[in-house]
Image (cartoon, coloured by chain):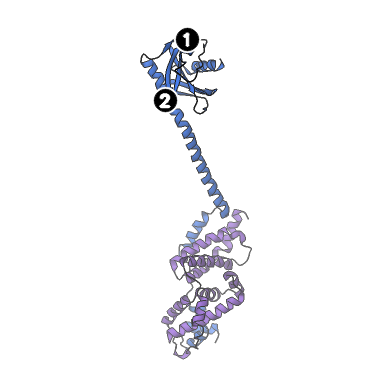
Chain colours: A purple, B blue
Amino acid sequence: MDAARKRALFEQTVMPHLNAAYNLARWLTRNGDDAEDLVQDAYLRAFRSFDTFQGQDGRAWLLAVVRNTCFTWLRKKGERPTAEFDEQLHGAADQSPNAESVLINQAALGTLQDCVEALPLEFREAIVLRELEELSYKEISDIARVPVGTVMSRLARGRKRLQQCLAGALR
Amino acid sequence: MNCETARRLMETNDPALAEHVLSCPSCMIGTHARYYEAPPGLERKIRQSLRQERGAPPAWRWLAIAASLLLGVSVTWNVAQFRSRANPEQVLAGDVLSAHVRSLAGTHLLDVPSSDQHTVKPWFNGKLDFSPGVKDLEGFPLLGGRLEYFEGHPAAALIYGRHNHTINLFTWPSATPTGAGTQTRNGYHLQHWSSNGMTFWAVSDLNETELGQFVSLYRRK
């Protein structure tokens, strides 16, 4: 691919998804400044490895780069995947939330934010890609490099934890 | 209740929503979790950093950097080599010129004043551990000989004349073989060369052409 064509194709397929890239990075890092740096870094990486792009969905392709950039950075920072650990610790204490006792208000929305941020990284990743980016299970499995079954299980467990978190906070 | 209903209820802030939210957090997230939009200025920053990319794959980039580093090192090394070669020669040229000027300034031009090579050459016997080539050169009369000292070695100085000019020809066994060269310092011309393990320096206020003639005459004989 010659340089001019590469630039044009990149402009057309990758550049429009800046918001999706930032949203994912922001949710994964839980910090605006870090997200901004990492998205910039990710775009550079995406451009350098754009030769591996084979005409698939530009947004999913970019999000995979963003995701890897963020995970590498988080690992360097010492953050470890916590999903399995959390599941073992908290999975058993599952109770149906008492719906009647919950009122939805601005505080609850703030709580929702906190509860999503409190999710283990892998759950958070799956939830954000699914609920906010509305990607398919297959696309998420490609991005997170895990089987589709794992994606589904992470989503289910993530939702369950969200329910617990919300119920606990709003009760 | 489906998500669409929930979405509408969210807008009306209906408390009935609560039940659904807790049974369907996906709806809650989809409708109310914040979608972070890229801050203004981020796109500009990204475009700027992308413009600086030449589109070359990183491997080439690193190769190019490595190559230019290597070139830099090699240039530095060569300059250093050149300097370490050039510097002793410059120092020596200075010594040669000083010896020439000194010989003319005082009364000590000749230890053995003679135009006869068969007088001058034997005079060095016992004073040097080598025998200098004393030659009769047409147009450059031999005036005599003298002892000098260069590079930690005794050296022979052979003095030739040309009209009113004096030529000092210094010779001593080479420490290391050096190339030939010509230079001008303070209006004096210097020529040096090596031959048969001997170093030769000729210096004079004679013009460069005639000094060149002297040197080639000497070397031919």
Circle 1 residue: B119
In primary-sequence order, the first of circles 1 and 2 is: 2
Q: Which chain letter goes with mark 2?
A: B
Residue with the most extreme front position: B126
Q: From the viewer's perspective, is residue A4 above or below residue A128?
A: above
Mark yes or no: residue A84 visible: yes
Circle 2 residue: B94
Is residue B68 or residue B38 the one in the foreground?
B68
Q: For the point 50% across and 77% down, which residue is it?
A: A85
Q: Where residue B88 sits in the image (x, y, percent)?
A: 45, 30
Q: Marks 1 and 2, how far apart in space? A: 30 Å
Q: Where residue A138 sits in the image (x, y, percent)?
A: 61, 73
Q: From the viewer's perspective, is residue B207 above or below residue A23?
A: above
Q: From the viewer's perspective, is residue B45 above or below residue A156?
A: above
Is residue A140 or residue B106 the one in the foreground?
B106
Three-letter amino acid code of the residue under disc 2: Gly
Indicate the quadrant containing the C terminus of chain B: top left, top right, bottom left or bottom right: top right
Q: Nearer the viewer, mark 1 or mark 2?
A: 1
Three-letter amino acid code of the residue under disc 1: Thr
Is residue B74 or residue A7 the one in the foreground?
B74
- Side of A54 where B10 appears, left or right: left
Q: Where residue B79 sits in the image (x, y, percent)?
A: 48, 37
Helix, strand or loop for disc 2 = helix
Q: Which chain letter goes with mark 1?
A: B
Mark yes or no: residue B159 visible: no
Helix, strand or loop for disc 1 = helix
